[in-house]
Amino acid sequence: MFWPLLLFLVVRDCPPVQIRKRLATTLIVAGFLSLLLSIYLTFHNQPWAFFNPFTRVWEFALGALAYLGGLTDNRRRTSELLQWLGLFALTSAACSFDNYTRFPGFAAVIPTLGIFAILISSVKAAQSVVTRVLESPAMRLCGELSYAWYLWHWPVFVLARSIFGAESIASRVMLIGLSFALA
C-alpha cells in the first residue's frame, strides 16, 4: 500500500512533462534510503532486514526505474553485453551465496543489479541468445510459477530437513522439483 500511495503523491499535481523526472528522482532517493536501511539492519537484525518491506523498497525502485527506461545505451552490442553481465551476476549469486551470506544487505545488490541489467537491455537486444532463452516456453513457465514456487520451497525444505536431517545435493534437487510441482 505504501508504494502506490507514494508514487501517487509524487505525481499528483505534477505537470505531465515533469512526471518522469519527478518519478525517477523519487525512486532514486527512496531506493538509496531503503538500501542504506537494508544494509544497516542486515548487520544488526538480519531477520527484520529480510522481512521488513521498507528494506526492500530499493529493489522495487530499481524495477520501476527499468520500467521508466531511458537508462540503456542505444547500441545492440552494449545491450547484449549488459545481458551477459546481468546473467553472470545472477549465476554468481546463486552459486556462491550460502547459509553464511548476510542477506539482504550488500549481498542483495548482486542479483538485483543483475536483473536490472537484463531488464534495461532486453529491448535493444531482442534477438540475443539471452533474450531468446528467457522468452522460451520453459522459462516463461518458471516465471509464471516463480512466486508460488518461492512460497512452496520453504515448507518443503523445512519439513524434509526435520524428517530426514541434512540434505545431499541429489535430495535438494528433488526437493526443488517437488516445490516446483506443488507450485
Image (cartoon, rainbow, N blue to C red):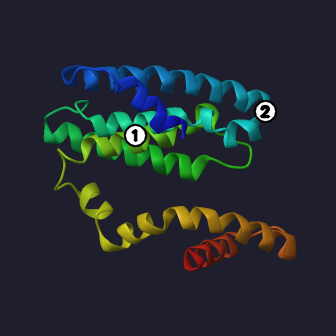
- Kindly indicate whether the residue at mark 2 contacts the one at mark 1 (C-beta within 8 angstroms): no
**Would you say 133 lies left or right of 33 here?**
left
Q: Nearer the viewer, residue 149 or 9?
A: 9
Give the residue displayed 76% in from the left and 69% down from the top: 167
The residue at the far front in this view is 13
User: Where does residue 77 sit, x and y in percent of width and height?
Assistant: 17, 40
Give the residue displayed 51% in from the left and 22% down from the top: 32
Give the residue displayed 54% in from the left and 35% down from the top: 2
Toward which corner of the image does residue 121 lie, by quadrant? top left
Q: Quadrant of the C terminus?
A: bottom right
Give the residue displayed 64% in from the left and 68% down from the top: 152
Q: Which residue is mark 1?
A: 63
**Would you say 49 lies left or right of 3 here?**
right
Q: Amino acid at mark 1?
A: Gly
Q: Nearer the viewer, residue 182 or 177?
A: 182
User: Of the numbered discs in the image, which one, if any, rests on residue 45?
Assistant: 2
User: Where does residue 79 sit, x and y in percent of width and height?
Assistant: 22, 40
Q: Is residue 155 above or below residue 19?
A: below
Q: Amino acid at mark 2?
A: Asn
Task: Bin the neighbour count of mark 2 within 10 Å (Cα to Cα): few under 14, some 14-19, many 20 and up.
Answer: few
Q: Nearer the viewer, residue 144 or 168?
A: 144
**Would you say 6 lies left or right of 51 here?**
left
All told, the count of numbered labels is 2
**Would you say 81 lies left or right of 181 here?**
left
Q: Nearer the viewer, residue 19 or 64?
A: 19
